[in-house]
Amino acid sequence: MINQISSYGLVLALVLALVACSEPQASKLQGSTMGTSYSVVITRLPEAVSEESVQQGIDSILEQVNQQMSTYRKDSELSQINQSAANLWLNTSAELFAVIQSAQLISQQTGGAFDVSVGPLVNLWGFGPPESLVTDTPSEEQIERARALVGYHYLEIKQENRQLRKPFKELYIDLSAIAKGYGVDAVASYLDSLGIEDYLVEIGGELKGKGVSQRGDYWRVAVEKPVPGQRMIQRVIEVDDFAVATSGDYRNYFEKDGVRYSHTIDPRTGRPINHTLASVSVLSDEAMLADAWATALMVLGEEEGYKLAEEKGLAAYFLYRQGEAFLSRETSAFSRLTKHSG
């Protein structure tokens, strides 16, 4: 699997409003992948295509993504890169290289707020694998030691032959904040290749919809109200051939001495984020980009994140705390895309 549900930058902040799932004519395929679950709803299948064959195809695609990008599989392509020695040019698959290249670009555009090498800090604060769990907040010295191992700019890329190089062995790449979105895109592309025109693909809360539901209207998904321990709808969005991803700080955190520590770590400071932003939802043509940008904007916070989202023309929906209430703010691109949504 790519990472556990508690992984950096990924919060299951979308619940599917799949009224069409109850319709017997619609096909609903489900399974497990990347430490979470997936759900694919298809309004109608082409005559020559069976549910069984589509399920097998989806499972095969997601198995490949896991084998390329998992940090939990010791023999995965990414794990082998993480275990490799320093200063070696390493060959990569086209898929893994494309995801890392996209991540690096977003890192540059956000000044390092998004960083796939943040793993040592995530583990230090106890939000990584079970063996990384901690019983106390780390010291300044521990944070600085971990920060020295973090930095997207350390990873060298040679585009012409899809190679990577690490300047030191300890550089660790974790694609948890982008790989699930990539998996959604890969499954959607597969469905397109079969001539399937109406579907909704979801992996761990990241999703992409195309065409219409069984009702004959756009797919409807709900952005959660960011309240710990509860499942309430904040807003319903009609998905018209685009992807949606959400990042938030309300599902995975710990409290110590009255202080709340979010699982979302700011790579620039080495510490959990500390601002009023509770969640960010991003709409994009690609789920991979929506996934990564949601994390990046969550790290940046309400003001800096909103400003950058407007500058980049991102369709983003911000929910932030004001006392006991939640207030929303959306970019102009988000307003245009969702003008018919409730």
Image (tube, rainbow, N blue to C red):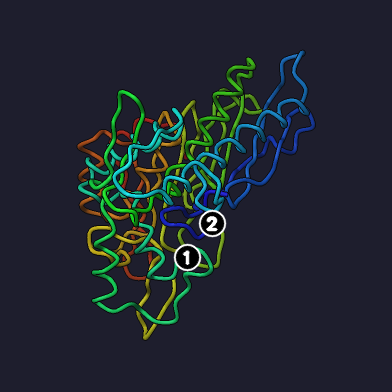
Number of other residues with Cα within 10 Å of mark 2, as a class: few under 14, some 14 to 19, many 20 or more = some
| Residue 310 horizontal/vertical position (percent) | 23, 39
Q: Which residue is mark 1?
A: 252
Q: Which mark is residue 5?
A: 2
**Eyeballing the image, is 59 above or below 159?**
below
Nearer to the camera, 68 or 317: 68
**Total numbered badges shown on the rendered structure:** 2
- Residue 56 visible, this orientation: yes
Residue in the picture at 54% in, 41% down: 221
Nearer to the camera, 339 or 2: 2
| Residue 2 horizontal/vertical position (percent) | 53, 49
**Horizontal placement of 342 versus 145: left or right?**
right
**Horizontal placement of 168 versus 134: left or right?**
left
| Residue 72 horizontal/vertical position (percent) | 54, 53
Q: Are marks 1 and 2 in contact (CB under 8 Å)?
A: yes
Number of other residues with Cα within 10 Å of mark 1, as a class: few under 14, some 14 to 19, many 20 or more = some
Nearer to the camera, 22 or 115: 115
The amino acid type found where label 2 is placed reads Ile
- Label 1 – label 2 distance at C-alpha: 9 Å
The earlier-in-sequence mark between 1 and 2 is 2
Residue in the picture at 68% in, 26% down: 43
The answer to which quarter of the image holds residue 340 is top left
**Horizontal placement of 21 versus 110: left or right?**
right
**Horizontal placement of 76 versus 107: left or right?**
right
